Amino acid sequence: MPDLMDGVANFRRDVFPGKAGLFARLATHHRPATLFIGCSDARVVPELITQSEPGELFVIRTAGNLVPAHGPAPDGVAASIEYAVAVLGVTGIVVCGHSGCGAMTALAEGHDLSAAPQVAAWLRGAHAAPSRTAPAGSGPAAVAALVRANVSAQLRNLAGHPSVARALAARQLTLHGWVFDIATGTVERLEASDPAGA
Ligand SMILES: [Zn+2]
């Protein structure tokens, strides 16, 4: 593993001094306006692609940017969503899929995930509903279609979380679907839908 402490030293020396005032304020204030739900993929860096400063994005990253449907069992993703919406009062949520997503490729192409049973279960669960609506098949076009369908499905799951549903009903929150293309650095905004009514 590279020595990440080298990066920490560079941050302290070259970056932190210029943002010392910001960090001093953030030390006692946490009021992000946006919850960003993206894939854990190392190539999709929310703060970089949105050029956001520390304190601006509350971030959840999961394999395949999946949002579990609301349920009674304790769930770290659900807890983070609830905290962002009900406690921090974010006014927007972005669910961001991306090109070349390993999770969506595995789903689209039916990869053997027997060596990764937790991944298989995560993708197989109700969270992965898009597989019902996306065209079957392999190859880049099928994966790209599934990436889009997956973002829409996760927005529907998101809307079913009680804190999100309440904020949507009160018109205090908007939901957005994005797809980030790694090769070009572009973001496609998916058509606004009505996840609350889906
Ligand atoms: Zn991914």
Image (tube, rainbow, N blue to C red):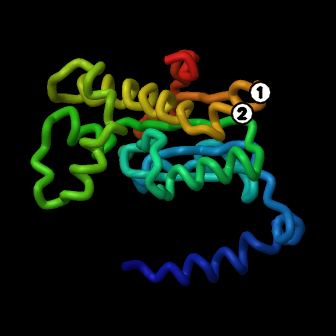
Occupied quadrant, residue 109 = top left
Asked if residue 79 is positioned above or below residue 143 in the image, the reply reads below
Secondary structure at badge 2 equals helix
Task: For label 1, count other residues whose C-alpha is less than 10 Å away and answer few (under 14), some (14-19) or many (20+).
Answer: few
Camera-side residue: 140 or 105? 105
Asked if residue 14 is positioned above or below residue 79 in the image, the reply reads below
Occupied quadrant, residue 53 = bottom right
Q: Position of residue 122 (x, y in %)?
A: 30, 49
Asked if residue 138 is positioned above or below residue 124 in the image, the reply reads above
Point out the quarter of the image occupied by ligand 1. top left
Q: Determine whether, in the image, residue 151 is placed left or right of residue 112.
A: right
Q: Determine whether, in the image, residue 169 is placed left or right of residue 6.
A: right
Q: Position of residue 75 (x, y in %)?
A: 47, 56
Residue type at the position of mark 2: Ala
Asked if residue 12 is positioned above or below residue 117 in the image, the reply reads below
Q: CA distance from mark 1 to mark 2?
A: 5 Å
Camera-side residue: 121 or 187? 121
Residue at the location (71% across, 25% down)?
169
Q: Position of residue 91 (x, y in %)?
A: 75, 37
Indicate which disc residue 167 carries. Answer: 2
CB-based contact (under 8 Å), mark 1 and mark 2? yes
Indicate which disc residue 81 carries. Answer: none
Secondary structure at badge 1 equals loop
Occupied quadrant, residue 195 = top right
Q: Is residue 185 at least partly visible in the picture? A: no
Residue type at the position of mark 1: Ala
Q: Which residue is mark 1?
A: 170
Q: Position of residue 54 (x, y in %)?
A: 73, 59
Work out which quarter of the rendered image holds the N terminus and state it. bottom left
